[in-house]
Image: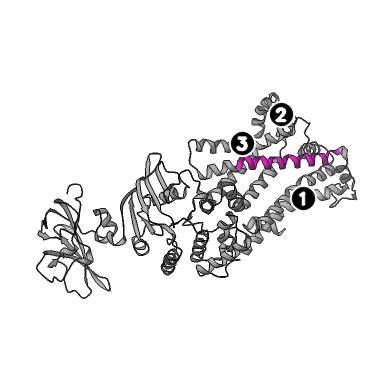
Protein backbone atom coordinates (compact mmCIF):
# COMPACT_ATOMS: atom_id res chain seq x y z
CA UNK A 1 0.00 0.00 0.00
CA UNK A 2 2.71 2.40 1.10
CA UNK A 3 4.89 1.27 -1.82
CA UNK A 4 2.09 1.68 -4.34
CA UNK A 5 1.41 5.14 -3.09
CA UNK A 6 5.07 6.05 -3.31
CA UNK A 7 5.31 4.86 -6.90
CA UNK A 8 2.16 6.78 -7.81
CA UNK A 9 3.80 9.85 -6.34
CA UNK A 10 6.94 9.25 -8.37
CA UNK A 11 4.94 8.86 -11.58
CA UNK A 12 2.95 12.02 -10.86
CA UNK A 13 6.15 13.95 -10.27
CA UNK A 14 7.75 12.63 -13.43
CA UNK A 15 4.70 13.58 -15.48
CA UNK A 16 4.41 16.98 -13.82
CA UNK A 17 8.03 18.01 -13.58
CA UNK A 18 10.09 16.06 -16.10
CA UNK A 19 7.74 15.76 -19.08
CA UNK A 20 7.19 19.48 -19.71
CA UNK A 21 10.95 19.95 -19.69
CA UNK A 22 11.57 17.55 -22.61
CA UNK A 23 10.15 19.77 -25.41
CA UNK A 24 12.18 22.63 -23.94
CA UNK A 25 15.36 20.61 -24.21
CA UNK A 26 14.59 19.75 -27.82
CA UNK A 27 13.70 23.36 -28.66
CA UNK A 28 16.92 24.62 -27.12
CA UNK A 29 18.88 22.38 -29.51
CA UNK A 30 16.75 22.98 -32.58
CA UNK A 31 17.88 25.13 -35.45
CA UNK A 32 15.06 24.28 -37.80
CA UNK A 33 11.89 22.64 -36.51
CA UNK A 34 8.86 23.18 -38.73
CA UNK A 35 5.45 21.56 -38.81
CA UNK A 36 4.82 18.63 -39.41
CA UNK A 37 8.30 17.31 -38.51
CA UNK A 38 8.27 15.28 -35.33
CA UNK A 39 11.83 16.26 -34.45
CA UNK A 40 13.94 19.22 -35.55
CA UNK A 41 15.34 18.83 -39.04
CA UNK A 42 18.46 20.81 -38.17
CA UNK A 43 20.27 20.79 -34.80
CA UNK A 44 22.49 23.48 -33.33
CA UNK A 45 24.20 24.59 -30.11
CA UNK A 46 23.81 28.25 -31.00
CA UNK A 47 21.13 28.88 -28.37
CA UNK A 48 23.39 27.56 -25.64
CA UNK A 49 26.30 29.59 -26.94
CA UNK A 50 24.04 32.60 -26.79
CA UNK A 51 22.92 31.81 -23.22
CA UNK A 52 26.49 31.74 -21.96
CA UNK A 53 27.62 34.83 -23.85
CA UNK A 54 27.78 38.07 -21.84
CA UNK A 55 25.49 39.89 -24.25
CA UNK A 56 22.51 37.72 -23.28
CA UNK A 57 23.00 38.70 -19.60
CA UNK A 58 21.71 35.24 -18.61
CA UNK A 59 24.72 34.43 -16.43
CA UNK A 60 24.53 37.86 -14.83
CA UNK A 61 20.79 37.42 -14.22
CA UNK A 62 21.35 33.95 -12.81
CA UNK A 63 23.92 35.20 -10.33
CA UNK A 64 21.70 38.14 -9.30
CA UNK A 65 18.69 35.86 -8.83
CA UNK A 66 20.78 33.45 -6.77
CA UNK A 67 22.25 36.17 -4.55
CA UNK A 68 18.85 37.78 -3.99
CA UNK A 69 17.11 34.45 -3.29
CA UNK A 70 19.75 33.40 -0.76
CA UNK A 71 19.63 36.81 0.92
CA UNK A 72 15.82 36.66 1.02
CA UNK A 73 16.00 33.19 2.59
CA UNK A 74 18.29 34.48 5.33
CA UNK A 75 16.04 37.51 6.01
CA UNK A 76 12.93 35.30 5.98
CA UNK A 77 14.44 32.98 8.55
CA UNK A 78 15.56 35.86 10.77
CA UNK A 79 12.13 37.46 10.67
CA UNK A 80 9.88 34.44 10.21
CA UNK A 81 11.34 32.01 12.73
CA UNK A 82 10.78 34.12 15.86
CA UNK A 83 7.39 35.24 14.56
CA UNK A 84 6.27 31.67 13.86
CA UNK A 85 7.43 30.50 17.28
CA UNK A 86 5.61 33.31 19.04
CA UNK A 87 2.38 32.64 17.13
CA UNK A 88 2.56 28.88 17.58
CA UNK A 89 3.33 28.74 21.28
CA UNK A 90 1.84 31.85 22.86
CA UNK A 91 -1.53 33.46 23.23
CA UNK A 92 -1.43 37.23 23.12
CA UNK A 93 -3.66 40.17 22.35
CA UNK A 94 -4.06 40.81 18.64
CA UNK A 95 -2.75 37.36 17.65
CA UNK A 96 -5.71 36.90 15.28
CA UNK A 97 -5.01 40.20 13.53
CA UNK A 98 -1.32 39.39 13.11
CA UNK A 99 -2.13 35.95 11.67
CA UNK A 100 -4.57 37.60 9.24
CA UNK A 101 -2.02 40.24 8.24
CA UNK A 102 0.45 37.47 7.49
CA UNK A 103 -2.04 35.94 5.08
CA UNK A 104 -2.70 39.21 3.25
CA UNK A 105 0.31 39.03 0.88
CA UNK A 106 -0.97 35.67 -0.35
CA UNK A 107 -4.40 37.15 -1.09
CA UNK A 108 -3.42 40.58 -2.45
CA UNK A 109 -1.60 40.46 -5.82
CA UNK A 110 2.05 41.46 -5.55
CA UNK A 111 1.68 44.18 -8.15
CA UNK A 112 -0.87 46.04 -5.98
CA UNK A 113 1.25 46.19 -2.87
CA UNK A 114 4.44 46.80 -4.83
CA UNK A 115 2.98 49.85 -6.58
CA UNK A 116 2.32 51.36 -3.15
CA UNK A 117 5.68 50.34 -1.79
CA UNK A 118 7.37 51.80 -4.86
CA UNK A 119 6.49 55.34 -3.70
CA UNK A 120 7.91 54.65 -0.26
CA UNK A 121 11.07 53.01 -1.61
CA UNK A 122 11.76 56.01 -3.89
CA UNK A 123 11.74 58.24 -0.84
CA UNK A 124 13.99 55.80 1.05
CA UNK A 125 16.32 55.49 -1.99
CA UNK A 126 15.71 51.74 -2.07
CA UNK A 127 14.56 51.54 -5.69
CA UNK A 128 17.07 50.12 -8.18
CA UNK A 129 19.04 48.50 -5.34
CA UNK A 130 19.80 44.93 -4.37
CA UNK A 131 18.43 45.55 -0.85
CA UNK A 132 15.24 47.10 -2.20
CA UNK A 133 14.49 44.16 -4.48
CA UNK A 134 15.27 41.69 -1.68
CA UNK A 135 12.97 43.53 0.71
CA UNK A 136 10.08 43.52 -1.75
CA UNK A 137 10.62 39.78 -2.33
CA UNK A 138 10.17 39.30 1.41
CA UNK A 139 6.49 40.29 1.14
CA UNK A 140 5.32 37.13 -0.66
CA UNK A 141 7.99 34.97 1.04
CA UNK A 142 7.38 35.63 4.73
CA UNK A 143 3.82 34.26 4.82
CA UNK A 144 5.03 30.88 3.58
CA UNK A 145 7.98 30.81 5.97
CA UNK A 146 5.74 31.72 8.89
CA UNK A 147 2.84 29.43 8.00
CA UNK A 148 5.07 26.39 7.59
CA UNK A 149 7.04 27.12 10.75
CA UNK A 150 3.92 27.80 12.86
CA UNK A 151 2.77 24.25 12.26
CA UNK A 152 6.28 22.92 12.88
CA UNK A 153 6.55 24.77 16.20
CA UNK A 154 3.00 23.79 17.25
CA UNK A 155 3.87 20.12 16.80
CA UNK A 156 7.23 20.56 18.46
CA UNK A 157 5.87 22.12 21.65
CA UNK A 158 8.05 23.45 24.47
CA UNK A 159 8.56 20.36 26.61
CA UNK A 160 11.89 19.39 25.03
CA UNK A 161 13.23 22.92 25.36
CA UNK A 162 11.98 23.10 28.95
CA UNK A 163 13.64 19.77 29.70
CA UNK A 164 16.92 21.05 28.30
CA UNK A 165 16.63 24.22 30.39
CA UNK A 166 16.16 22.28 33.60
CA UNK A 167 19.18 20.13 32.64
CA UNK A 168 21.39 23.20 32.68
CA UNK A 169 21.29 24.57 29.12
CA UNK A 170 20.95 28.33 28.70
CA UNK A 171 18.60 29.76 26.04
CA UNK A 172 21.23 29.88 23.26
CA UNK A 173 22.42 26.33 23.86
CA UNK A 174 18.81 25.14 24.03
CA UNK A 175 18.24 26.65 20.59
CA UNK A 176 21.40 25.21 19.04
CA UNK A 177 21.25 21.75 20.65
CA UNK A 178 17.54 21.05 20.88
CA UNK A 179 15.29 23.43 18.96
CA UNK A 180 17.27 23.79 15.74
CA UNK A 181 17.89 20.07 15.12
CA UNK A 182 14.25 19.42 15.93
CA UNK A 183 12.77 21.93 13.51
CA UNK A 184 15.41 21.51 10.79
CA UNK A 185 13.34 19.35 8.39
CA UNK A 186 10.46 21.83 8.54
CA UNK A 187 12.83 24.76 8.24
CA UNK A 188 14.34 23.27 5.08
CA UNK A 189 10.92 22.94 3.49
CA UNK A 190 10.06 26.53 4.42
CA UNK A 191 13.41 27.78 3.10
CA UNK A 192 12.86 25.86 -0.14
CA UNK A 193 9.51 27.60 -0.60
CA UNK A 194 11.09 30.94 0.14
CA UNK A 195 13.91 30.36 -2.31
CA UNK A 196 11.58 29.35 -5.12
CA UNK A 197 9.17 32.25 -4.52
CA UNK A 198 12.01 34.76 -4.63
CA UNK A 199 13.52 32.97 -7.65
CA UNK A 200 10.26 33.34 -9.59
CA UNK A 201 9.51 37.01 -8.83
CA UNK A 202 9.12 39.12 -11.96
CA UNK A 203 6.72 42.06 -11.50
CA UNK A 204 8.09 43.07 -8.11
CA UNK A 205 11.67 42.89 -9.38
CA UNK A 206 10.91 44.98 -12.45
CA UNK A 207 9.03 47.62 -10.46
CA UNK A 208 11.54 48.05 -7.65
CA UNK A 209 14.69 47.02 -9.55
CA UNK A 210 13.76 49.35 -12.42
CA UNK A 211 15.97 47.55 -14.91
CA UNK A 212 19.10 48.12 -12.85
CA UNK A 213 18.76 44.86 -10.95
CA UNK A 214 18.51 42.25 -13.68
CA UNK A 215 17.36 38.86 -12.44
CA UNK A 216 16.79 35.77 -14.54
CA UNK A 217 13.01 36.25 -14.97
CA UNK A 218 13.72 39.81 -16.15
CA UNK A 219 16.12 38.42 -18.77
CA UNK A 220 13.72 35.65 -19.73
CA UNK A 221 10.55 37.69 -20.13
CA UNK A 222 11.25 39.42 -23.50
CA UNK A 223 12.04 36.03 -25.08
CA UNK A 224 8.65 34.59 -24.15
CA UNK A 225 6.93 37.28 -26.23
CA UNK A 226 9.63 37.13 -28.89
CA UNK A 227 9.92 34.73 -31.81
CA UNK A 228 13.20 32.96 -31.02
CA UNK A 229 11.82 29.80 -29.39
CA UNK A 230 15.24 28.18 -29.18
CA UNK A 231 16.79 30.93 -27.09
CA UNK A 232 13.65 31.14 -24.90
CA UNK A 233 13.78 27.37 -24.33
CA UNK A 234 17.46 27.43 -23.36
CA UNK A 235 16.95 30.28 -20.90
CA UNK A 236 13.86 28.57 -19.46
CA UNK A 237 15.94 25.49 -18.74
CA UNK A 238 18.55 27.60 -16.96
CA UNK A 239 15.68 29.14 -15.00
CA UNK A 240 14.08 25.81 -14.02
CA UNK A 241 17.31 23.94 -13.19
CA UNK A 242 17.96 25.42 -9.72
CA UNK A 243 14.34 24.90 -8.72
CA UNK A 244 14.56 21.20 -9.51
CA UNK A 245 17.98 20.94 -7.87
CA UNK A 246 16.64 22.58 -4.71
CA UNK A 247 13.67 20.22 -4.67
CA UNK A 248 15.85 17.14 -5.06
CA UNK A 249 18.42 18.31 -2.53
CA UNK A 250 15.81 19.18 0.07
CA UNK A 251 13.88 15.98 -0.33
CA UNK A 252 17.09 13.93 -0.07
CA UNK A 253 17.84 15.69 3.19
CA UNK A 254 14.33 15.10 4.45
CA UNK A 255 14.64 11.42 3.72
CA UNK A 256 11.40 9.53 3.48
CA UNK A 257 9.32 11.76 5.73
CA UNK A 258 6.41 11.85 3.34
CA UNK A 259 5.59 9.95 0.20
CA UNK A 260 5.68 13.02 -1.99
CA UNK A 261 9.01 14.21 -0.67
CA UNK A 262 10.31 10.65 -0.74
CA UNK A 263 9.27 10.50 -4.36
CA UNK A 264 11.45 13.48 -5.14
CA UNK A 265 14.36 11.84 -3.39
CA UNK A 266 14.20 8.85 -5.69
CA UNK A 267 14.55 10.86 -8.87
CA UNK B 1 19.89 16.63 49.22
CA UNK B 2 18.10 19.92 49.16
CA UNK B 3 15.50 21.35 51.46
CA UNK B 4 12.73 22.99 49.45
CA UNK B 5 10.43 25.65 50.80
CA UNK B 6 7.49 27.26 49.04
CA UNK B 7 6.30 30.44 50.71
CA UNK B 8 2.99 32.07 49.83
CA UNK B 9 3.44 30.83 46.27
CA UNK B 10 0.73 32.28 44.01
CA UNK B 11 0.29 32.23 40.26
CA UNK B 12 -2.40 34.04 38.34
CA UNK B 13 -3.17 33.65 34.63
CA UNK B 14 -5.22 36.72 33.73
CA UNK B 15 -8.20 36.38 36.09
CA UNK B 16 -7.66 32.75 37.01
CA UNK B 17 -5.71 31.86 40.13
CA UNK B 18 -3.90 28.63 39.26
CA UNK B 19 -2.03 28.36 42.54
CA UNK B 20 -3.19 30.28 45.59
CA UNK B 21 -0.92 31.08 48.53
CA UNK B 22 0.85 27.73 48.70
CA UNK B 23 3.03 27.12 51.74
CA UNK B 24 4.96 23.88 51.78
CA UNK B 25 8.20 22.55 53.18
CA UNK B 26 9.90 19.51 51.67
CA UNK B 27 12.63 17.93 53.78
CA UNK B 28 15.82 17.01 51.98
CA UNK B 29 15.72 13.52 50.50
CA UNK B 30 11.94 13.32 50.78
CA UNK B 31 9.67 12.01 48.02
CA UNK B 32 6.56 14.16 47.81
CA UNK B 33 3.42 13.71 45.70
CA UNK B 34 1.40 16.66 44.45
CA UNK B 35 -2.02 15.08 44.18
CA UNK B 36 -5.24 16.47 42.78
CA UNK B 37 -7.64 16.44 39.85
CA UNK B 38 -6.36 17.86 36.55
CA UNK B 39 -6.23 21.63 36.51
CA UNK B 40 -5.69 21.94 40.26
CA UNK B 41 -2.33 23.70 39.92
CA UNK B 42 0.05 20.77 40.47
CA UNK B 43 2.02 21.15 37.26
CA UNK B 44 1.99 24.94 37.54
CA UNK B 45 3.64 24.54 40.94
CA UNK B 46 6.33 22.23 39.49
CA UNK B 47 7.06 24.75 36.76
CA UNK B 48 7.46 27.49 39.36
CA UNK B 49 9.93 25.34 41.29
CA UNK B 50 12.01 24.84 38.12
CA UNK B 51 11.81 28.52 37.22
CA UNK B 52 10.18 27.83 33.85
CA UNK B 53 7.29 29.88 35.21
CA UNK B 54 7.64 32.83 37.56
CA UNK B 55 5.23 33.12 40.49
CA UNK B 56 2.93 36.12 40.67
CA UNK B 57 3.72 36.28 44.38
CA UNK B 58 5.67 34.30 46.91
CA UNK B 59 9.05 32.64 47.09
CA UNK B 60 10.75 29.36 46.19
CA UNK B 61 13.72 28.53 48.41
CA UNK B 62 16.34 25.79 48.10
CA UNK B 63 18.25 25.31 51.37
CA UNK B 64 16.99 28.68 52.60
CA UNK B 65 18.13 30.61 49.51
CA UNK B 66 15.55 32.33 47.33
CA UNK B 67 15.56 30.98 43.77
CA UNK B 68 13.31 33.63 42.22
CA UNK B 69 16.20 35.49 40.58
CA UNK B 70 18.04 32.29 39.60
CA UNK B 71 17.39 31.19 35.99
CA UNK B 72 16.11 27.67 35.34
CA UNK B 73 19.42 26.32 34.03
CA UNK B 74 21.23 27.26 37.26
CA UNK B 75 18.67 25.93 39.75
CA UNK B 76 19.48 22.25 39.46
CA UNK B 77 15.77 21.43 39.56
CA UNK B 78 15.41 18.86 36.81
CA UNK B 79 11.98 18.14 35.39
CA UNK B 80 10.84 14.99 33.59
CA UNK B 81 7.80 15.75 31.49
CA UNK B 82 4.88 13.51 30.73
CA UNK B 83 5.28 13.46 26.96
CA UNK B 84 7.98 14.41 24.46
CA UNK B 85 10.35 12.64 26.80
CA UNK B 86 13.60 12.31 24.84
CA UNK B 87 15.42 14.55 22.39
CA UNK B 88 14.43 12.80 19.13
CA UNK B 89 17.53 13.93 17.22
CA UNK B 90 19.96 12.39 19.71
CA UNK B 91 20.74 8.76 20.51
CA UNK B 92 20.33 7.41 24.03
CA UNK B 93 23.90 8.17 25.09
CA UNK B 94 23.65 11.81 24.00
CA UNK B 95 20.25 12.11 25.65
CA UNK B 96 21.47 10.79 28.97
CA UNK B 97 24.73 12.73 28.78
CA UNK B 98 23.05 16.01 27.83
CA UNK B 99 23.14 17.57 31.31
CA UNK B 100 26.81 16.64 31.81
CA UNK B 101 27.73 18.07 28.40
CA UNK B 102 26.02 21.32 29.39
CA UNK B 103 28.06 21.29 32.59
CA UNK B 104 31.25 21.03 30.52
CA UNK B 105 32.27 17.55 31.69
CA UNK B 106 34.83 15.74 29.50
CA UNK B 107 33.62 13.30 26.84
CA UNK B 108 35.36 10.37 28.53
CA UNK B 109 33.80 11.07 31.91
CA UNK B 110 30.37 11.49 30.30
CA UNK B 111 30.65 8.11 28.54
CA UNK B 112 31.60 6.41 31.79
CA UNK B 113 28.77 7.94 33.79
CA UNK B 114 26.22 7.35 31.04
CA UNK B 115 26.91 3.62 30.99
CA UNK B 116 26.79 3.60 34.79
CA UNK B 117 23.43 5.34 34.71
CA UNK B 118 22.01 3.01 32.04
CA UNK B 119 23.01 0.15 34.33
CA UNK B 120 21.04 1.75 37.15
CA UNK B 121 17.83 1.99 35.11
CA UNK B 122 18.30 -1.61 33.87
CA UNK B 123 19.03 -0.65 30.24
CA UNK B 124 22.76 -1.39 29.87
CA UNK B 125 24.19 -1.22 26.36
CA UNK B 126 21.43 1.02 25.03
CA UNK B 127 23.86 3.87 24.19
CA UNK B 128 23.46 3.86 20.42
CA UNK B 129 19.70 3.27 20.27
CA UNK B 130 17.50 6.02 18.89
CA UNK B 131 14.51 7.24 20.92
CA UNK B 132 11.95 6.06 18.34
CA UNK B 133 13.28 2.50 18.66
CA UNK B 134 12.40 2.38 22.36
CA UNK B 135 9.14 1.39 24.03
CA UNK B 136 7.26 3.86 26.21
CA UNK B 137 8.60 2.30 29.38
CA UNK B 138 12.18 2.36 28.11
CA UNK B 139 11.87 6.00 27.07
CA UNK B 140 10.60 6.79 30.54
CA UNK B 141 13.59 5.10 32.13
CA UNK B 142 16.05 6.86 29.83
CA UNK B 143 14.40 10.18 30.68
CA UNK B 144 14.80 9.33 34.35
CA UNK B 145 18.46 8.43 33.82
CA UNK B 146 19.04 11.72 31.97
CA UNK B 147 17.58 13.61 34.93
CA UNK B 148 19.43 11.68 37.63
CA UNK B 149 22.87 11.77 35.99
CA UNK B 150 23.31 15.46 36.88
CA UNK B 151 22.55 14.68 40.55
CA UNK B 152 19.85 17.33 40.69
CA UNK B 153 19.04 19.38 43.78
CA UNK B 154 15.40 18.55 43.19
CA UNK B 155 13.90 15.97 40.85
CA UNK B 156 10.48 16.89 39.47
CA UNK B 157 8.34 14.29 37.73
CA UNK B 158 5.16 15.23 35.89
CA UNK B 159 2.79 12.23 35.92
CA UNK B 160 5.72 9.80 35.53
CA UNK B 161 3.50 6.73 35.32
CA UNK B 162 0.52 8.11 33.39
CA UNK B 163 1.42 6.74 29.96
CA UNK B 164 2.45 3.25 31.06
CA UNK B 165 0.36 0.10 31.22
CA UNK B 166 -0.33 -1.58 34.55
CA UNK B 167 2.71 -3.90 34.70
CA UNK B 168 5.20 -1.28 33.60
CA UNK B 169 3.67 1.14 36.04
CA UNK B 170 4.46 -1.17 38.93
CA UNK B 171 8.02 -1.71 37.67
CA UNK B 172 8.61 2.01 37.14
CA UNK B 173 7.21 2.81 40.57
CA UNK B 174 9.65 0.42 42.22
CA UNK B 175 12.50 1.85 40.16
CA UNK B 176 11.73 5.45 41.07
CA UNK B 177 11.40 4.55 44.74
CA UNK B 178 14.63 2.53 44.83
CA UNK B 179 16.79 5.03 42.95
CA UNK B 180 15.33 7.98 44.82
CA UNK B 181 16.22 6.29 48.14
CA UNK B 182 19.63 5.22 46.92
CA UNK B 183 20.67 8.61 45.60
CA UNK B 184 18.75 10.46 48.31
CA UNK B 185 17.43 13.12 45.96
CA UNK B 186 14.65 15.44 47.07
CA UNK B 187 11.85 14.57 44.68
CA UNK B 188 8.38 15.82 43.87
CA UNK B 189 6.03 14.07 41.49
CA UNK B 190 2.65 15.09 40.20
CA UNK B 191 -0.22 12.65 39.91
CA UNK B 192 -4.00 12.55 39.80
CA UNK B 193 -4.08 8.95 40.99
CA UNK B 194 -4.44 8.72 44.77
CA UNK B 195 -3.27 5.10 44.90
CA UNK B 196 -0.07 5.99 43.09
CA UNK B 197 0.54 8.83 45.54
CA UNK B 198 -0.12 6.60 48.54
CA UNK B 199 2.20 3.83 47.38
CA UNK B 200 5.10 5.99 46.29
CA UNK B 201 5.23 9.14 48.38
CA UNK B 202 6.58 9.87 51.85
CA UNK B 203 4.09 12.68 52.10
CA UNK B 204 1.22 13.86 49.91
CA UNK B 205 0.16 17.43 49.17
CA UNK B 206 -3.47 17.32 48.08
CA UNK B 207 -4.59 20.32 46.04
CA UNK B 208 -8.01 21.40 44.79
CA UNK B 209 -8.44 24.50 42.61
CA UNK B 210 -4.98 25.81 43.38
CA UNK B 211 -5.44 25.55 47.14
CA UNK B 212 -3.51 23.12 49.32
CA UNK B 213 -6.06 20.99 51.21
CA UNK B 214 -3.82 18.77 53.28
CA UNK B 215 -0.11 17.98 53.44
CA UNK B 216 0.52 14.83 55.38
CA UNK B 217 1.71 11.23 55.34
CA UNK B 218 -0.44 8.92 53.14
CA UNK B 219 -2.05 7.20 56.13
CA UNK B 220 -3.48 10.48 57.40
CA UNK B 221 -5.62 10.93 54.27
CA UNK B 222 -7.46 7.73 55.22
CA UNK B 223 -7.53 8.12 58.98
CA UNK B 224 -7.57 11.84 59.53
CA UNK B 225 -8.88 13.72 56.44
CA UNK B 226 -9.22 17.48 56.88
CA UNK B 227 -12.58 17.79 55.18
CA UNK B 228 -15.36 15.89 53.48
CA UNK B 229 -13.79 16.80 50.09
CA UNK B 230 -10.49 15.22 51.08
CA UNK B 231 -12.27 12.11 52.38
CA UNK B 232 -14.24 11.92 49.12
CA UNK B 233 -11.04 12.09 47.03
CA UNK B 234 -9.77 9.09 49.00
CA UNK B 235 -12.95 7.16 48.22
CA UNK B 236 -14.79 7.71 51.48
CA UNK B 237 -18.32 9.05 51.06
CA UNK B 238 -19.71 7.91 54.40
CA UNK B 239 -20.95 11.08 56.04
CA UNK B 240 -23.45 11.61 58.87
CA UNK B 241 -24.27 14.98 60.42
CA UNK B 242 -24.18 15.27 64.21
CA UNK B 243 -23.33 17.42 67.20
CA UNK B 244 -20.37 16.66 69.40
CA UNK B 245 -20.63 16.90 73.20
CA UNK B 246 -17.39 15.77 74.81
CA UNK B 247 -16.99 12.03 74.30
CA UNK B 248 -20.13 11.44 72.28
CA UNK B 249 -21.84 12.67 69.10
CA UNK B 250 -25.62 13.06 68.84
CA UNK B 251 -26.88 11.94 65.45
CA UNK B 252 -30.21 11.14 63.83
CA UNK B 253 -29.54 7.49 64.70
CA UNK B 254 -28.80 8.08 68.37
CA UNK B 255 -25.68 8.85 70.35
CA UNK B 256 -22.30 7.57 69.18
CA UNK B 257 -19.34 7.16 71.53
CA UNK B 258 -16.04 8.61 70.34
CA UNK B 259 -12.46 8.75 71.61
CA UNK B 260 -11.94 12.41 72.58
CA UNK B 261 -8.15 12.14 72.26
CA UNK B 262 -8.45 10.71 68.77
CA UNK B 263 -10.55 13.48 67.15
CA UNK B 264 -9.69 17.12 66.59
CA UNK B 265 -13.10 18.74 65.95
CA UNK B 266 -14.34 20.87 68.91
CA UNK B 267 -17.78 20.50 70.49
CA UNK B 268 -20.63 21.61 68.21
CA UNK B 269 -21.75 20.68 64.73
CA UNK B 270 -19.63 17.98 63.08
CA UNK B 271 -19.78 15.38 60.35
CA UNK B 272 -19.19 11.78 61.43
CA UNK B 273 -17.31 9.49 59.08
CA UNK B 274 -16.11 5.89 59.17
CA UNK B 275 -14.25 4.36 56.22
CA UNK B 276 -16.09 1.51 54.40
CA UNK B 277 -13.48 -1.03 55.44
CA UNK B 278 -13.71 -0.01 59.14
CA UNK B 279 -17.43 -0.63 59.57
CA UNK B 280 -18.36 -3.88 61.35
CA UNK B 281 -21.17 -5.53 59.41
CA UNK B 282 -21.06 -8.36 61.96
CA UNK B 283 -21.09 -6.44 65.27
CA UNK B 284 -18.98 -7.76 68.14
CA UNK B 285 -20.56 -5.66 70.93
CA UNK B 286 -23.46 -3.29 71.61
CA UNK B 287 -21.36 -0.13 71.45
CA UNK B 288 -22.28 2.28 68.64
CA UNK B 289 -24.74 -0.18 67.23
CA UNK B 290 -27.08 1.31 64.62
CA UNK B 291 -29.77 -0.26 62.51
CA UNK B 292 -29.63 0.49 58.80
CA UNK B 293 -31.28 -0.71 55.60
CA UNK B 294 -29.32 -2.57 52.93
CA UNK B 295 -29.82 -0.82 49.58
CA UNK B 296 -27.57 -2.95 47.38
CA UNK B 297 -24.69 -5.38 47.54
CA UNK B 298 -21.92 -6.22 45.09
CA UNK B 299 -19.69 -9.27 45.28
CA UNK B 300 -16.13 -8.00 44.76
CA UNK B 301 -14.25 -11.30 44.88
CA UNK B 302 -12.25 -10.88 48.05
CA UNK B 303 -14.93 -8.90 49.87
CA UNK B 304 -18.54 -7.79 49.57
CA UNK B 305 -19.41 -4.15 49.06
CA UNK B 306 -22.69 -3.21 50.70
CA UNK B 307 -24.62 0.00 50.13
CA UNK B 308 -26.47 1.17 53.24
CA UNK B 309 -29.04 3.83 54.03
CA UNK B 310 -27.63 5.59 57.09
CA UNK B 311 -30.19 8.19 58.18
CA UNK B 312 -30.85 9.20 54.57
CA UNK B 313 -27.15 9.14 53.57
CA UNK B 314 -25.78 6.50 51.24
CA UNK B 315 -22.90 4.70 52.91
CA UNK B 316 -20.63 1.97 51.64
CA UNK B 317 -19.30 -0.80 53.84
CA UNK B 318 -17.01 -3.74 53.10
CA UNK B 319 -17.90 -7.08 54.62
CA UNK B 320 -16.64 -10.64 54.23
CA UNK B 321 -17.25 -12.13 50.79
CA UNK B 322 -19.60 -14.78 52.21
CA UNK B 323 -21.71 -12.28 54.19
CA UNK B 324 -25.31 -13.48 54.07
CA UNK B 325 -27.63 -10.49 53.75
CA UNK B 326 -30.39 -9.47 51.38
CA UNK B 327 -31.27 -6.18 49.79
CA UNK B 328 -34.07 -4.49 51.75
CA UNK B 329 -33.03 -6.09 55.07
CA UNK B 330 -32.52 -3.88 58.07
CA UNK B 331 -29.31 -5.01 59.75
CA UNK B 332 -27.39 -3.91 62.83
CA UNK B 333 -23.93 -2.49 62.10
CA UNK B 334 -21.26 -1.26 64.45
CA UNK B 335 -19.23 1.93 64.06
CA UNK B 336 -16.14 1.16 66.18
CA UNK B 337 -15.25 4.26 68.18
CA UNK B 338 -11.56 3.81 67.45
CA UNK B 339 -12.35 4.42 63.77
CA UNK B 340 -14.82 7.25 64.05
CA UNK B 341 -13.37 10.47 62.67
CA UNK B 342 -15.03 13.87 62.87
CA UNK B 343 -14.99 16.35 60.00
CA UNK B 344 -15.93 20.03 60.10
CA UNK B 345 -19.59 20.65 59.16
CA UNK B 346 -20.24 21.29 55.47
CA UNK B 347 -22.08 24.60 54.86
CA UNK B 348 -23.36 24.55 58.45
CA UNK B 349 -25.14 21.23 57.85
Mark 1 or mark 3, whichever is nearer to me: 3
Residues beneath discs 3 and 2 located on the same chain: yes
Q: Which residue has dot 1 on it?
A: A21
Which secondary structure is most common in the magenta stretch? helix
Q: Secondary structure at mark 3?
A: helix
Q: Say the numbered circle drawn on residue A126.
A: 2
- Measured Cα–Cα span from mark 2 to mark 1: 37 Å
Q: Which residue sits at x=72%, y=30%?
A: A208
Q: Do the CB atoms of the residues marked 2 and 1 lie less than 8 Å apart?
A: no
Residue A69 point in image, percent of width and height: 72, 41
Q: Residue B190 colored magenta? A: no
Mark 3 or mark 2, whichever is nearer to me: 2
Q: Residue A73 colored magenta? A: yes
Residue B102 point in image, percent of width and height: 58, 54
Nearest to the observer: residue A25 or residue B261: B261
Nearest to the observer: residue B297 or residue A187: A187
Q: Give the magenta part as a residue range.
A: A56-80
Question: Is residue B132 visible in the rendered structure shown here?
Answer: yes
Question: Is residue B330 visible in the rendered structure shown here?
Answer: no
Mark 2 or mark 1, whichever is nearer to me: 2
Amino acid sequence: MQRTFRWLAVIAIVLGVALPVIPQIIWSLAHRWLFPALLPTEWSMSSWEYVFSPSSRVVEGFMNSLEIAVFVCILSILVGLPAARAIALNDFKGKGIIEWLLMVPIIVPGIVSTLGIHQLFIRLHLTNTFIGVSLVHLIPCIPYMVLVMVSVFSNYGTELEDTARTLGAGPIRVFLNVTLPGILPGLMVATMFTFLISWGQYITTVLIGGGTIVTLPVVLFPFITGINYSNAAAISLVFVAPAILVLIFTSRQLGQDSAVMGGFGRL
Amino acid sequence: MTHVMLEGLTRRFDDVIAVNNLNLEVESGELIAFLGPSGCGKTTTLRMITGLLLPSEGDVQFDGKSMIAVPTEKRGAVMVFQKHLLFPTMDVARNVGFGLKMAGISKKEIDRRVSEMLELVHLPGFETRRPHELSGGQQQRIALARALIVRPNVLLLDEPLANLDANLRLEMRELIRTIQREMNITSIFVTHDQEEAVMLADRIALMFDGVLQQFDVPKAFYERPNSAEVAHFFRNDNFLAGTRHGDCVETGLGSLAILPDHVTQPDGKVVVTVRPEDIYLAPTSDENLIHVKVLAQVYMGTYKQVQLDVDGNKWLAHGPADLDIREGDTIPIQLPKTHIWLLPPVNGK
